[in-house]
Structures are given as structure tokens and as C-alpha cells.
């Protein structure tokens, strides 16, 4: 009897609190509308002002969104070396002015000498940090091949004009922002420990905001790419420097790995969400599939009436996320190696079945395979940029070294960092990676295989026209962050900037808890979620969305995440 009464009281409280929150939300959303940067002809949103400027300059001189995207990717490798890269990889989703869409996979690959147990000791246990730091953590980089594919298919300007701004930044130097000065300071210990040479970024005194920084070796590498296309990276001097670096540090990337790397065009994941066509990244990223599952499940719930960050919305989002991330762990991996059941995972009946046990009055317990406990999810060292040109071509690119400055190895003489993307494989079934994500056979290591990503570059159409370009860094939180931004705009009527600024939550099946950004929820909401059985953990920030919305009047609203990264900026004209 006591149990029933408690249950009824909880349910009663839950509805009272939720209804108050909904009322509050309705009031909030009818007050002020905070918009981002508005422009008519084109918009570039990136994590760094110099990269946004490079993209805008390309658009203004008549380049299209693809020209600008390639220029931005190379500029980010210079001005944001903790995440922007040529030593890493990423994904592009595009929509042309004619409405054609597609996806490009330039994810890193496991080296040919890699294998399933390469990070395990003789007892079969993972060796601490081996997949995270140092030469063996690096996958074969994909960025330069990706940019080459995009250039061959879509560019309108000559390649030397597209890449030259990055070369100029590297050769002529530029002033460090406070964020980047701090990044270099935080890197120093690892930089000295991991490298066998002394990278030019090693410094005894602290970097300061405003210091001029030059990347001379990187400029030479970019010049080789300018002059020889992708062969300037995957063959010749740059390839030799990478392999020499590998040999110096017991790494295994070979000349054959580099020469055989290819970026791949993929068929995007497409789902409809309340009349919108959502176009996102297929495997080797889990981003589009998990996002698609979340959106399909969301259509069965009245999110518009739930409001932003209320007990109901957080509870239902968590339940949906729990199920989709469980599917991710079991079913998702590189499609070239594993038969990912894409159609099944997005089927209507599958969705209905999957959500049928979601109730509004209690949290479902995630079954424990292995402890998914990780100390924290704070590595947001991926970067996203969104670009639209005056013709309406749209490009959404998320690119990464994985952790902060990747595996911390700088290729001696070539001036760039290598990724530590190998940690995104499931190095042993059920053992969590740095983001607490677990996996199994689908994402086991194999030579030449791409490791599963969560990157979710996404483009949305409404009524057959471009509506939104969106993406974010954030490791495993990428997908849930993009998902919330979409709900914030489509279901809750927020502007692009408000949707980006809104506080975010994240859950991922294992570990079985909800992560919330500081100030995301008030104590009443936290209490009511705990009463439903959810464990809550607060962290400082989740994601850094860089997005563009096409407004009803046809203007672009560019929204950079300046609250979480003051360097991010939307520039339009
Ligand atoms: N390295 C993060 C991701 O690809 O999801």
C-alpha cells in the first residue's frame, strides 16, 4: 500500500512540476528572440575567427560553399591545431543548389599491420593509454584525401587559390587567441613526454594571448599538397616523414597504408521528422543512424508541449537515447567490413517496438555488460563548420584528431599532429573507450577498417528547400547535441542562436546516467528526474554547435557557439 501511495505521489508531483515547467517555457519562448548573425548571400560558421574569415573571403571572391569548405579545413589545420587537422579525418554532408545531397567519408583507417588485439596485454587486458597516446594510437589520416575528393567533384576555384590562405597563415604567422594560448600551455607536458624529438611548440615560458605564432614546417607540407594534390601528403616527402616518425616511435603506419588511403562517397542517412527531411552521415559514423533513430522515436511523443529541458522532455530523450546507443554498441561499425542493418534500425515497426516499453513514470535500467564508468567526458576536441553560399549550396563538415591534439605526436619536419582515432574502435568487447562508449564485433579492429565515429554533420530541408546546416564536436555527445538543437528549432520554435545556446543533456545507455550542463536544470526538475530513477551528473559544457538556419524570408541566420567557445564566429555577407 505504501509503495502504491509513493508511486501515486511521485506521479502527481511529476505532472505538477512538468506542467509548471511547460508554462514557464511557453512564457520564455514568447518573450525575446535572440538571433545570430543575419546575412543574405552566404554564411560561414567555424570555431575560429581566422578560419571563418578565410571561408568568407573565398565566398566573396566567387567561390562556392565547397571551395570555402576546403579552404576552411586547411585553415583550421593551422589556426586550431588541437582539432583542425591534416593528420586526422572527418565527414562531410552536402546539399547542392539543385537539391542533390550526398556524404563523404574521410575517416581514418586502421593501419594494415593493425589487428583486433593490438591494445591488449598477454592476459587480454587493455594496456593503459596505448590507444590514446603515442604513435600506435594513430589511424591512417583521411583529411587530405577527403578534401581532394570534394575539390575534384565540386570546386570552382583553382586549388592553389583555395589552399593559399592556410599557407599564408602558417608562413606569415598570426596572433594566438586566449583559448589557443591556453591550449598550447595545457599541451606542454604531453608534448615533451610523447615525442622523441622536440616539437617547435615546446616552450619553457607560457604562451600568452596575442603572441605571434608561425608554423613553418606545416606551411611546407601544405605547399607540397598545393603543388601535388593529395600525393603531396600520401606520397613523397610528407609520406616519408610520417613513416620515419612511425619508426622512431614504434608506430605501424606504412607507405602502403598512406598510398592506398581513399575517401569514400556514401549514401546519406535520410529520415523525415515532422515534415522535415533530415540528411546525415551514414557509417562509418554512427551519427546519422542514431540521430535518425532518435528523431523517429521522438515523433511518438509530444515534445512541442513538453518544452525545453523539462522533466518530461529530459526523461523521454534519455529513454530514446538509451535504446539508440544500445543499438549503436551492438550493430554499428564500418559498412565496408560489417553488414550494418541500416534499414532495419530505421524501420517504422522497429521504432514502434523499441519505444513500446517507455513509460512516463520510471526510468528503464540499462543492462550492464561491463562497467561503462569513465572519469569524465570532457574531450571535445573535434571541430565542426557549416557553410552556405549565395546559390544555396550547403556544406556541413565535422573533422577531428579525436582527443586534444590527437595522440600528441607531431610529425617531425612536417609540422602537424597525428590523430588518436584508434581509440574509437572497440579495443575489447564491452570495454569503454575514452567517451565511455562500448562496442562489440561490429566495431572490432581489423586492418584497413574505419573506426566507428559519432560525428553527425547534418543538413535539413523543409518543403524541398534548404532549412538548416548543423553539427558539433563532443565525442559521444555529438549526436544527442545535434538532436536537441533540431528539437529546439522544429519542436520548440527557438531561433538558431537560442537553440545553440540552450543548455544540453546527454545520455548513452552506458554509463547509465544523464549528464547535464551546469545550469541546465533547476533543482525541482533534478529531483523529479531522480524520483523517476535517473542518476544525474553535472558537467561544465556539452558540445559546440556551429549552425545555419534559413529563415522564412530567405536570409541566413548563422549561430556560432560563443558561450562555450568564445573564438567561434559566424561571418556572413
Ligand atoms: N573521435 C570522435 C568521433 O569520431 O566520434
Image (cartoon, grey):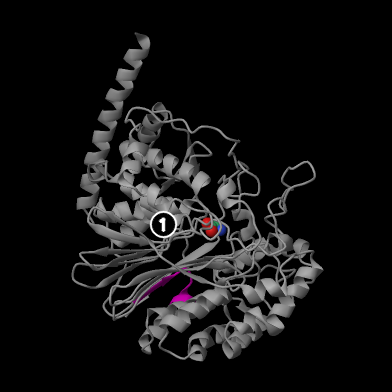
**Dot 1, crowdedness within 10 Å: few (<14), some or many (≥20)?**
many
Residue named by callout 1 = 288
- Tell me if residue 47 is in the magenta stretch: yes
Quarter of the figure with residue 170: bottom right
Image position, residue 133 (x, y; %): 70, 58
**Is 421 situated above or below 426?**
below
- Describe residue 469's horizontal placement relative to residue 238 as left or right: left
Ligand 1 positioned in quadrant? bottom right
- Describe residue 36's horizontal placement relative to residue 207 as left or right: left
**Is 366 situated above or below 508?**
above
- Tell me if residue 439 is in the magenta stretch: no
Point 66% across, 83% down: residue? 216
Image position, residue 520 (x, y; %): 40, 45
Magenta part of the chain: 43-52
Task: Please name whichever residue, 413 or 12, is drawn nearer the observer in this view of the structure.
Answer: 413
From where the camera sits, is residue 283 visible?
Answer: yes
Quarter of the figure with residue 21: top left
Image position, residue 487 (x, y; %): 30, 51
Quadrant location of the C terminus in the rendered image: bottom left
Image position, residue 191 (x, y; %): 72, 65
From where the camera sits, is residue 134 visible?
Answer: no
Point 49% across, 58% down: residue? 285
Quadrant location of the N terminus in the rendered image: top left
Amino acid at each position: 500500500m505504501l509503495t502504491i501511495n509513493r508511486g501515486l505521489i511521485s506521479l502527481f508531483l511529476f505532472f505538477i512540476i512538468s506542467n509548471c515547467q511547460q508554462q514557464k517555457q511557453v512564457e520564455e519562448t514568447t518573450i525575446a528572440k535572440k538571433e545570430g548573425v543575419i546575412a543574405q548571400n552566404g554564411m560561414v560558421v567555424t570555431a575560429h575567427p581566422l578560419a571563418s574569415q578565410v571561408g568568407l573571403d573565398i565566398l566573396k571572391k566567387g567561390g562556392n560553399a565547397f571551395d570555402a569548405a576546403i579552404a576552411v579545413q586547411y585553415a583550421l589545420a593551422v589556426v586550431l591545431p588541437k582539432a583542425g587537422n591534416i593528420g586526422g579525418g572527418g565527414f562531410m554532408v552536402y546539399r547542392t543548389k539543385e537539391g542533390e545531397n550526398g556524404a563523404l567519408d574521410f575517416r581514418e583507417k586502421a593501419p594494415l599491420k593493425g589487428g583486433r588485439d593490438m591494445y591488449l596485454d598477454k592476459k587480454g587486458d587493455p594496456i593503459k593509454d596505448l590507444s590514446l597516446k603515442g604513435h600506435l594510437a594513430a589511424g591512417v589520416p583521411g583529411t587530405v584525401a577527403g578534401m581532394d575528393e570534394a575539390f575534384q567533384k565540386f570546386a570552382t576555384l583553382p586549388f592553389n587559390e583555395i589552399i593559399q590562405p592556410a599557407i599564408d597563415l602558417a608562413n606569415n604567422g598570426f596572433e594566438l587567441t586566449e583559448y589557443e594560448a591556453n591550449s598550447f600551455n595545457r599541451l606542454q607536458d604531453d608534448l615533451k613526454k610523447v615525442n622523441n624529438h622536440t616539437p617547435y611548440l615546446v616552450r619553457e615560458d607560457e604562451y600568452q594571448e596575442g603572441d605571434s605564432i608561425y608554423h613553418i614546417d606545416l606551411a611546407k607540407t601544405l605547399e607540397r599538397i598545393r603543388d601535388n594534390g593529395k600525393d603531396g601528403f600520401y606520397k613523397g616527402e610528407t609520406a616519408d616523414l610520417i613513416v620515419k616518425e612511425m619508426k622512431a616511435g614504434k608506430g605501424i603506419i606504412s607507405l602502403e597504408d598512406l598510398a592506398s588511403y581513399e575517401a569514400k562517397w556514401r549514401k546519406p542517412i535520410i529520415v523525415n521528422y515532422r515534415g522535415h527531411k533530415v540528411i546525415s552521415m551514414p557509417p562509418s559514423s554512427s551519427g546519422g543512424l542514431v540521430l535518425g533513430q532518435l528523431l523517429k522515436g521522438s515523433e511518438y511523443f509530444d515534445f512541442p508541449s513538453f518544452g525545453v529541458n523539462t522533466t518530461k522532455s529530459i526523461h523521454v530523450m534519455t529513454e530514446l537515447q538509451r535504446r539508440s546507443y544500445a543499438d549503436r554498441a551492438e550493430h554499428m561499425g564500418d559498412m565496408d567490413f560489417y553488414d550494418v542493418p541500416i534499414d532495419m534500425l530505421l524501420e517504422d515497426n522497429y521504432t514502434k517496438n523499441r519505444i513500446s516499453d517507455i513509460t512516463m513514470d520510471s526510468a528503464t535500467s540499462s543492462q550492464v555488460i561491463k562497467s561503462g564508468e569513465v572519469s569524465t567526458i570532457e574531450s571535445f576536441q573535434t571541430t565542426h563548420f557549416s557553410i552556405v553560399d549565395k546559390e544555396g549550396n550547403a556544406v556541413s563538415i565535422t573533422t577531428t584528431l579525436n582527443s586534444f591534439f590527437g595522440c600528441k605526436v607531431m610529425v617531425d619536419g612536417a609540422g602537424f599532429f597525428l590523430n588518436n582515432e584508434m581509440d574509437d574502435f572497440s579495443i575489447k568487447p564491452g570495454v569503454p573507450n575514452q567517451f565511455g562508449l562500448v562496442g562489440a564485433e561490429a566495431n572490432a579492429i581489423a586492418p584497413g577498417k574505419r573506426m566507428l565515429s559519432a560525428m553527425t554533420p547534418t543538413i535539413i530541408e523543409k518543403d524541398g528547400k534548404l532549412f538548416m546546416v548543423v553539427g558539433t564536436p563532443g565525442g559521444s555527445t555529438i549526436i544527442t547535441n545535434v538532436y536537441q538543437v533540431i528539437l529546439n528549432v522544429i519542436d520548440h520554435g527557438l531561433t538558431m542562436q537560442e537553440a545553440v545556446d540552450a543548455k544540453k543533456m546527454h545520455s548513452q545507455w552506458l554509463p547509465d546516467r544523464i549528464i547535464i550542463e551546469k545550469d541546465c536544470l533547476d533543482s525541482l526538475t533534478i529531483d523529479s528526474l531522480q524520483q523517476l530513477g535517473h542518476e544525474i551528473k553535472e558537467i561544465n559544457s556539452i558540445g559546440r554547435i556551429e549552425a545555419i538556419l534559413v529563415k522564412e524570408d530567405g536570409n541566413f541566420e548563422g549561430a556560432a557557439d560563443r558561450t562555450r567557445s568564445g573564438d567561434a564566429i559566424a561571418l556572413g555577407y
